[in-house]
DNA sequence: GTCCAGGTCGCGC
DNA sequence: GCGCGACATGGA
């Protein structure tokens, strides 16, 4: 089955797909030559599908799935997940207007950067953000791959392709498995605890999609393993850009570009982006990735 | 062997 | 509120 999905004027497929490193984390796969994004997805019905997303002119993308017959709710779920992953319903106009007033940032609006790819569920993205803390990017990639390959539900037609496992799968496998087989290190306890809360219904992450930033911060603080950096990154994932991810990369960038390589306080560094108000994260991100 | 990576927690002050 | 060691893992 395939669909043609209209996109906003300020949307561009390639910049969304590759704007940050998420497209390199399983079960995403990106083909740079074909400008095509793939993701294996387990639907609520239990069916596993391989979603293919590619640009279709300037005003649309094609979404296709070649995995047998899908009922109405499965089709609706796929399209809803694509909208979320590509941020088709997010309004970035205030950010672009601000970019156009600043010569060095005008390219962001002209080239339609800004919509950064996210996973289909908030659970998946919390896990992935935790995989970025206190380790190297290569380890993040390999841990995500291990989670998918060892715990994910396989595609019927291509069993080597697997979906990101559900929270209940993390719980069934157990904390020791996460540590000893998936090699998630000290994160295993944090991720097991999170999965347990989500799987049991104690924590309903789907409600987060409609929460104001202040409430999201409260929710994020309550998750063990989420500190200031991960909180800011997850707020970005959720569409709130007012908090800066002050980590080693942030410090390196700001010190090199604005402090002649000298150490600075987080406060002084953050002040650099204060004029961006609710869009500080994006301003920093594209200041660093011109 | 030793150090550290896009940090965070829990403790003691 | 701030400083500090511990935390798993694998690569340099």
Image: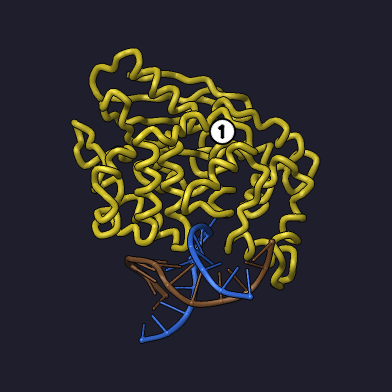
Chain colours: A yellow, B blue, C brown
Residue A69 x %, y %: 25, 17
Residue A266 x %, y %: 69, 61
The answer to whether A87 appears left or right of A24 in the picture is: right
Q: Identify whether C11 is placed above or below A104.
A: below
Residue A46 x %, y %: 26, 27
Label 1, residues with CA under 10 Å away: few <14, some 14-19, many ≥20: many
The answer to whether A28 appears left or right of A277 in the picture is: left
The answer to whether A8 appears left or right of A27 in the picture is: right
Task: Report helix, strand or loop for mark 1.
Answer: loop
Label 1: chain? A
Residue at (35% x, 49% y) in the render: A192
Residue at (53% x, 38% y) in the render: A16
Task: Report the quarter where the N terminus of chain A lies.
Answer: top left
Q: Nearer the viewer, residue A253 or A144?
A: A144
Q: Is residue A64 visible?
A: yes
Name the residue that disc number 1 marks.
A12
């Amino acid at each position: 089955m395939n669909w043609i999905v209209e996109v906003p004027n300020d949307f561009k497929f390639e910049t969304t797909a590759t704007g940050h490193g998420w497209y390199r984390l399983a079960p995403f796969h990106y083909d740079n030559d074909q400008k095509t994004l793939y993701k294996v997805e387990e639907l609520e019905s239990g069916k596993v599908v391989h979603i293919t997303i590619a640009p279709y002119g300037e005003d649309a993308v094609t979404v296709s799935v070649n995995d047998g017959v899908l009922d109405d709710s499965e089709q609706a779920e796929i399209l809803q997940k694509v909208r979320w992953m590509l941020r088709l319903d997010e309004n970035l106009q205030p950010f672009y207007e601000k970019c156009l007033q600043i010569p060095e940032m005008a390219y962001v609006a002209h080239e339609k950067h800004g919509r950064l790819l996210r996973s289909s569920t908030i659970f998946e993205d919390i896990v992935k953000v935790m995989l970025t803390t206190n380790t190297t990017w290569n380890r993040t990639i390999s841990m995500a791959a291990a989670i998918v390959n060892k715990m994910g539900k396989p595609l019927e037609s291509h069993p080597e392709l697997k979906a990101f496992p559900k929270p209940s799968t993390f719980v069934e496998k157990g904390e020791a498995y996460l540590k000893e087989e998936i090699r998630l290190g000290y994160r295993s306890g944090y991720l097991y605890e999170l999965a347990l809360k989500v799987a049991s219904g104690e924590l309903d992450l789907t409600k987060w999609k409609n929460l104001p930033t202040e409430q999201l911060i409260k929710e994020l603080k309550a998750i063990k393993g989420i500190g200031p950096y991960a909180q800011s990154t997850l707020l970005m994932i959720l569409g709130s850009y007012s908090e800066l991810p002050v980590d080693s990369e942030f410090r390196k960038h700001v010190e090199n570009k604005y402090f002649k390589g000298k150490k600075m306080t987080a406060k002084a560094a953050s002040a650099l982006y204060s004029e961006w108000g609710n869009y500080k994260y994006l301003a920093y991100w594209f200041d660093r990735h011109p």
